[in-house]
Image (cartoon, grey):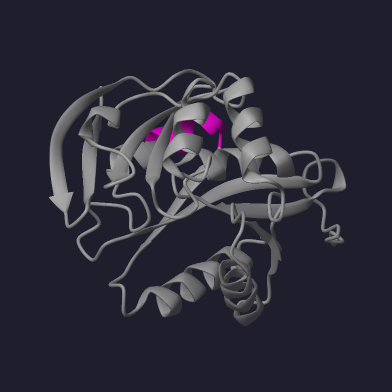
Amino acid sequence: MTHLRRVGGCDGQARAAISWSGGKDSLAALSASRGGLDVVAALTMFDEAGARSRSHGLRPELIAAQADRLGLRAVSARCSWATYDESFTAALRGLARDGITHVVFGDLVFSQHREWAEARCAEAGLTAVEPLFGRPTSDLFDAFVGSGATALMVTIREPWLDESWLGRALAADMKATFAERGIDPCGENGEYHTAVLDGPLFGRPIRVTAGERVRHGDCVALDLVPC
């Protein structure tokens, strides 16, 4: 269990940021950590041009809209894949200078992802918090769709899914199909990614229009354009 160092955030809670992908797991991690942390910022990594998020390929306008609806300060950094670790740690050091002491991550299954998060935070003198790690992904899927949040599929990977799934909101009735096709309920093997547009923590929904579809190997991505 993570012990929080109290440093005078809201009601004495530790001030935290969240590593923000824009997808369902980030939102679930934010929701799970709200009771014990004062989460004030969302950190997202972008490509060198600042045009797309590194994790889910989302527009910066959409990431900014998500942070706005959640009442978080949007923090970003640009990087290549080769400089990702260095740039991420530098961004964490900037957060630490602003009084952040903890960083929330939405890792679920893979220990190497958790170890990476802990190592980067340690380099910046911060504490990594993983509120979802180790919980069954079937339970996490059920909890997410039961929360009333809206998450649209923005990337699918063949052969598990095809382009007809792009733009669809996660729903309970998808779970049976996932099981039939050997898909992890939360897409932990890269079967799909989502973008969240609404939920209990949102001040108001985000309206989007569907843009072009782009193929990268066996993945197809849908561009969501905020209205």
184 horizontally vs 31: left or right: left
Residue 91: x and y in percent read 48, 68
Which range of residues does the magenta coloring cover? 65-71
Quarter of the image with the N terminus is bottom right
Residue pictured at 39% horizontal, 33% vertical: 65
Q: Estimate the x, y position of residue 184 in percent, counting from the top left.
A: 51, 45
Residue 7 sits in quarter: bottom right
Q: Main secondary structure of the magenta part?
A: helix
Q: Is residue 89 above or below residue 136?
A: below
- For the C terminus, which image quadrant? top left
Residue 151: x %, y % from top left? 44, 29
Q: Is residue 49 magenta?
A: no
Seen in the picture, residue 185 relative to 13 is either above or below; the reply is above
Query: Residue 48, relative to residue 9: is it above or below?
Result: below
Point out the residue furthest to the front here: 180
Residue 86 percent location from the top left of the image:
43, 80
> Going 25% across and 57% down the picture, which residue do you hit?
50
Q: How many marks?
A: 0
